[in-house]
Amino acid sequence: PIVDWAEIYNFGQPPTDGSTDLITMGSVASQHAVFMARSTVDLVLIASLLQAISISGRNRQQKRLYKAGTDPENWYRPGLIDRLDIFVERTELRRACMAVLNRKAPWPDRNTTAEQANKLHFDLKKLRQPNLVDFRRYNSDRLAQLHGELKDPVARAFIAAIAFERPDFDLAPRIVLLDNLAERKAPESELYTLLDRVRSDIVDAPSSGDVSVDQLRSILFHSAKRAGLQEFKHQVIGLMKDSKPGREAIEALADVAGRSNPDAYQYTRKSAVHAIREIARSNPNVPDVRFAIGILNELRGCNTGAGVLNAINEGVADLERLLQTLKP
């Protein structure tokens, strides 16, 4: 139907009303139109086929390079390359994971430990099969990043099972991985993906205590000079605002706003000032409100910019009004 649309709709039949339409079946323009339409479809189909063949060949070559030069006696020694293209990676990880999964045991969940995954849920020796990618040889940094990004508890448990027996591979908490990505100037998409996982962890287990003010401050420090991360920094500041104790969070936010190693962008500094104000208002008492006012007054002496200074003045005025309503 796509190629033969002209015949289906009787396109270009000779007019019966004596009109002189430009495109008719008997005209050169009509023949050109039909030829170009069919040629375009043919070229698109041929190009798609060639691209599919090229991708298939490239993927096979990647897997050959991954296996080339490996040591049968050392299952953690990589080949000529130690990681795959991201699209091949996800597909092969899923295949390997399901191939070595113990179907007789309950499937892993978010509470499965690395030891349980290794000894109960997965038989990693099956990764020696020639049709599988042996992820025991995979790049440890990339495996750790995948463990942080993935939502599937089975895939995460599979990586944890590898980490349990691999001497050079230690799974760090997601917040630590996020800090490492920020320090390495990782792409924005990776930062946002991992931050979303950190936020999900906090919602699922708010009392886990894995996220500290110092870790969040370190993330902001490592991304302080990067442009294009406004929403990312705003979300990190939001996590810092909800961290305990409140005074430590205020001190760290004051550094971001201008006191020590401040962020390079005014929108981040303003967000930090607003967060200080919100922390003081969240559970108001005289000592903490006075502490926040003192910090904001201290920021007035820093070179924060006109917009940040206005936010400081508004915050001080608001907290002073709040202070008058509190009992000493």
Image: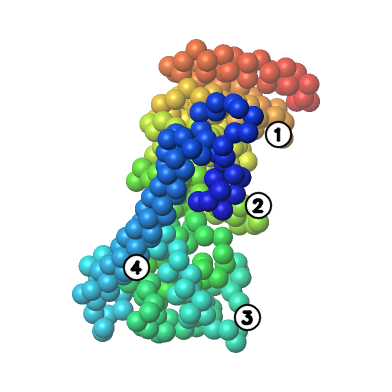
| Cα distance between the residues tagged 4 and 2 | 31 Å
Q: Earlier in the sequence, mark 1 or mark 4?
A: 4
Task: Tell me, yes or no, whether the two marked residues, 3 and 4, touch with CB atoms within 8 Å.
Answer: no
Image point 42% across, 35% down: which residue?
28
For the C terminus, the image quarter is top right
Q: Amino acid at mark 3?
A: Pro
Q: Amino acid at mark 4?
A: Tyr
State the image coordinates of residue 267 (x, y, percent, origin top left). 51, 24
Task: Tell me, yes or no, whether the two marked residues, 3 and 2, touch with CB atoms within 8 Å.
Answer: no
Q: Amino acid at mark 1?
A: Ser
| Cα distance between the residues tagged 2 and 1 | 19 Å
Are there few (<14), some (14-19), or many (20+) residues within 10 Å of tag 1? few
Q: Which numbered disc covers residue 282?
A: 1
State the image coordinates of residue 276 (x, y, percent, origin top left). 59, 29
| Cα distance between the residues tagged 1 and 4 | 46 Å
Q: Which residue is mark 4?
A: 138
